[in-house]
Amino acid sequence: MKIFLNDYNQETIEKAESILFNGNGFVGLRGNLEEDYYNHFATNRETYLNGFYESKTINYPEKMFGFTPSGETMISVIDGQTTLITIGGERFSIMTGTISQSSRYLDMTKGITVRKLVWTSPAGLKTKIKISRLTSFVYKNIFAMKIEFERLNHNAEITLSTHLNFHPIRTIDKNDPRMSHETQSIQVEEIDLPNKTCTFTTLTSQLKAQLQWQINSQLEQTIQEKRIVLNSILTTDSYEKKLSYAFADENHTGIEKNFDELLALQTTYLVDFWRTAKVEIASEENLEESVNYGTYALLQSLGTNGTTSIAAKGLSGSGYEGHVFWDAEMYVFPVFLHLQPQLAKSHLNFRYQTLEKARANRQLFGYSQGALYPWRTISGSESSPFFEGGSAQHHINSDIAYAFINYYRYTDDLDFMKEAGFEVLLETARVFTEIGYEKAGSFHLDKVTGPDEYTVLVNDNYYTNKMVAYQFEWIGILAQIIAKDDPKCWEQLVAKLNVTSKELEQIQRYSRNMALPFDKEQGIIAQDREFLNKSGWPYNPETTKHPLLLNYHPLTIYRYQISKQADAVFALMLFQNQFTTETIQRSVTYYDQITTHDSSLSYSIFSAVYSRLGDMEKGYEYFLKNARTDLDNLHKNTKDGIHTAAMGGTFMAILYGFCNLQIKDNALTLDPHLPAEIQSIAFTTQFKNECYRVEVNHKSHTIQKVTS
Amino acid sequence: MKIFLNDYNQETIEKAESILFNGNGFVGLRGNLEEDYYNHFATNRETYLNGFYESKTINYPEKMFGFTPSGETMISVIDGQTTLITIGGERFSIMTGTISQSSRYLDMTKGITVRKLVWTSPAGLKTKIKISRLTSFVYKNIFAMKIEFERLNHNAEITLSTHLNFHPIRTIDKNDPRMSHETQSIQVEEIDLPNKTCTFTTLTSQLKAQLQWQINSQLEQTIQEKRIVLNSILTTDSYEKKLSYAFADENHTGIEKNFDELLALQTTYLVDFWRTAKVEIASEENLEESVNYGTYALLQSLGTNGTTSIAAKGLSGSGYEGHVFWDAEMYVFPVFLHLQPQLAKSHLNFRYQTLEKARANRQLFGYSQGALYPWRTISGSESSPFFEGGSAQHHINSDIAYAFINYYRYTDDLDFMKEAGFEVLLETARVFTEIGYEKAGSFHLDKVTGPDEYTVLVNDNYYTNKMVAYQFEWIGILAQIIAKDDPKCWEQLVAKLNVTSKELEQIQRYSRNMALPFDKEQGIIAQDREFLNKSGWPYNPETTKHPLLLNYHPLTIYRYQISKQADAVFALMLFQNQFTTETIQRSVTYYDQITTHDSSLSYSIFSAVYSRLGDMEKGYEYFLKNARTDLDNLHKNTKDGIHTAAMGGTFMAILYGFCNLQIKDNALTLDPHLPAEIQSIAFTTQFKNECYRVEVNHKSHTIQKVTS
């Protein structure tokens, strides 16, 4: 299971910085070349720690009441991957001399990235170089690198210089609202060269961390401007460095292990992981690679300590400022729910740990009750500076509720629902009961933004309302289950949350009477109450520039029936059994015509809906367009970080689309439609504390419990 | 005609800075006390030149395509009103000693502000001080100040120190989105003490200006930090200083005149002005003062050089950054149209001169044709950083068109329509024809914002659509008139503007078929297509905090049926004859209930509509609430500058409301409804190059041509 990215051209180098990143859910390093090259190619040379961010005041040219006052940005900690090499006095660089026998890849079974090449220096010295890197899944504080040399035609001296850089190097174009526009630096507090540690913090947040380093070679340590430089002369054939990053209260375990020991532990961990996590796809295209790379990248990015989670770009880049969005629940969460439910639970824990901040966020909006989760965050506080397409997306509340519900449906973990789930469901529901209203027997939610950011502040967004109705329904279901299973616990919840039977009845009534706009004439669900009255996109589709958000004024985008991504269609996917096939068919066809798929969250959902309908041409076409989002750099911005939602989407398109895996009558069911291009699919899923093997081909499909 | 503001308490001092400002349409000084007091009271001590601004890049936390890249801010030029006085070595201050026989007022007939008092110093020296100030209407570059002293019980030496301050002093709280949040300074280029001039410019705009000063007393000139200080010992009984401000290509005429000469010229000018400009109101309340103060403040603020106009706060303060908005057309313009049409024309010239910039602004939005005037501007470029409640208010185009049309209706100045008017009407219309669309026989305009900023990005805003329909209709009318009157000119216009008969026909059809949302059940016009479906404001009216925009999240404000100001009701006022009385009655009653009148543009329009209906209780109540907006500081922000729109509104409520002055069959007509509290109203209006005297009382009303 390897991903190769060999070339040294600009696009590949940029792409590789994201795709070949090293991460373990805590430490993340971009896949930069070890030697510096930023005078030649655009680069972001950075290292991140999940949960480590800088706070900043958000300045608005015209600040309105309740605008998010400050935001969080994931910033690079000390980056220690840079290793300058000289051979016989000549500086190793891909820009000089010649390169042969070059190979660069990620090995997903061993959990390392490898770079191999033979470099012939301008003077003719020929050296084989192999660089291996890992961030340990066993010791989450550890990044390790090993560089092996083989002098092929000489015996010259080799020197190495490792830079521990305090200031992020960013040369990638930032004229994009999706990117962070400021380069902020950590603040170095103390450098202790004898003990090989450096303590750092940020200017305004309270976070404090320490880097410790170990290098296997004789070295001279100096402090230079904005970096510590560690110079060595190679004494054996290999150079090893280990960097350990720890928050104030944690320690640097594992740093004493050598690279091969770390690698052995890493391999053991991953062999075990893949045993039940690998998705097997028999097909001409290398689809298996795509889906498993996605799973691996997500594993590398997901924080598991209960106070961190997974950013839209994981730990691979600083796009979207390292923020966690709704895709954590609606795209990434299902992957872990099926493969490693305890990791899925860890994400839910992150939400539960930040419920208090969500209550504070609700107050920012002037709402008097409940909790409103932030649209974008690191620590749990809202960081969205643009409310129309940001914090107005109140569906985040229901997305989180949906994840809790699905976690319960797949695990039967009622204890967690008592401890956290019910509280989250109820508190997040209360914002909706406050802003919603009943009119002529229907419950309405006005002026919120749905997933489609090309239409903002709408009334009765179908996706939102449908999700809220589901959340409301489940509040009733869980209330009954908990009350029956554990009356004392229920009593405590009632007291703690101040919940009355009147409130529960009201929530059930709202759920039943939720407004779900439907166009009878066309037989389609309506994205919102007014969406279908809007005029069509008036500009020539041939010359329309994508993504619209970078090429048209929001006013123009908002004015027409044009969708960035699956919105109403997402509701079709999630609640398939509640629609007639005809409605699904008509609706997906309609929305497909007006959707630009400018978001990487779109194709996967359309693919799943088409696949279930048996439209395998579309189902497969859209699957392909999504599955290789990063590997083929389809959005031209993989350099800013991987698209975790697209990866989750690939997984969903397989499980929920091609295989149509569902829970029915408390059991897993399949109703597969495989595209002709795929011969078979096999994977393992967890369900209610058991492990199930799923195998699907064009003739048959089976779900079998695995006895371990 | 005097406005008195005697007290030296904080509110009066702050209010007086705006109300007692000196302006002549070019130079404007805040009515600060001459001695410094900013350690004791909040103050903005500033001098403005109409059209002098600083440019600044607008920084957005999340910048979208087409967001206004830079903005203009009116900044204080060198402020020279500060005059520190010592008497017998004791520093004159209202904070020490005692004050008696104090009087402070604006004399609108002489065109001066006067401050008189007797100051007894802590040591007991008693001195009568009279300070007179004017900005000359004859020499628009000139500000002059005269300070007269009478030593009542001593013969001590009096010294004076005039400060020419380069850096604005602003201590007034700025935690308000309506205020400029940065204090920017002019850049001093050259100080020439012997020639008593100082040349200054701005950091980023290209503007260059010069201050010249003259003081009648022996003086020592020094340059201190951020100011020039002119020290004198009083040699006669009075101290005179004159400051002349001129752009690079203008000169300092008038500076050689002494104060009394300047005052004589000023008085002559104003006596002539008031001859036809004064509105006489017989009433218990001092209403005459309010309306005439308004006219005077507008006269003091209106730029008349064709490249400047009138800001929302005139030249009295830096609120709204000195920007010109739509109220210049819809509130202020009518005052000059009736009183001095050549001044009204001068404003239209400002719009015509900036048509090219409006074309550039249209491109910023990605529209392919026509012109879109900026929502807020100084030089003609868009300065609005918040498009939802700002540049989305495309009705600005029709407001400007409306002003051109009304100018023509009142003056018969067809030449100006050929030269400027038709081009402005057509070019501004083209943006609407591009973004509008026909559906089922109706022409719709979606996703624009109407006057009510508490509901943004709406579809078929009634006010906007009605105004556009009127503009479209007049394009046809003017085309016919010009083609008939001057075929050659028409030919040239056709060629210049590339207009086809097909386009003209289309515009006429759109006008006829304009969508004008109407609620049949309630018999009221609808503010927009969806407005009446919104839920009502759910919070307790008793505890609701005003203005909403400073106390509630925009999302909350947008969500409910709550209006900031007259929106649909403005259409009722402008097009009264096109509605049944019942529709007007029902509509105004409905919208009144849901309007917060948080904008100073609201009460006057409601007053006029109620008055015409004969509901004089409401008509008069709202008239009062508007008429004393600034004099009674009703919005608590007069300190930031006067409300020019409220002043225009007062005038309109009298002429269009109480008197119901209209043009019918090419003649002026009246249909008055006077409130019981007003015995009679009389004024003079210009109409088709003639002067008409209007007299209205409870028994009769007359319009008589005045033969001069």
Image (tube, coloured by chain):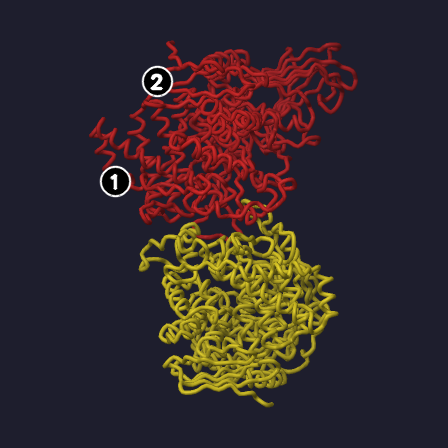
Chain colours: A yellow, B red
Check residue B689 in the rendering and tell me which mark sits there, or answer none: 2
Q: Is residue B224 above or below residue B387?
A: above
Q: Could you tell me which secondary element the residue under label 1 belongs to?
A: helix
* A44 lies above or below A665: above
| Chain bearing mark 1 | B
Image quarter of residue B101: top right
Residue in front for this viewpoint, B202 or B195? B202
In this rendering, would B235 be left or right of B493? right
Which percent across, then down, holds residue A481?
65, 72
Q: Quadrant of residue B41?
A: top right
Quarter of the image with the N terminus of chain B is top right
Residues beneath discs 2 and 1 located on the same chain: yes
Pick the front one: A535 or B418: A535
Q: How many marks?
A: 2
Q: Which residue is mark 1?
A: B505
Q: Position of residue B446 (x, y in %)?
A: 40, 47
Q: CA distance from mark 2 to mark 1?
A: 33 Å
Describe the element under mark 2 as helix, strand or loop: loop
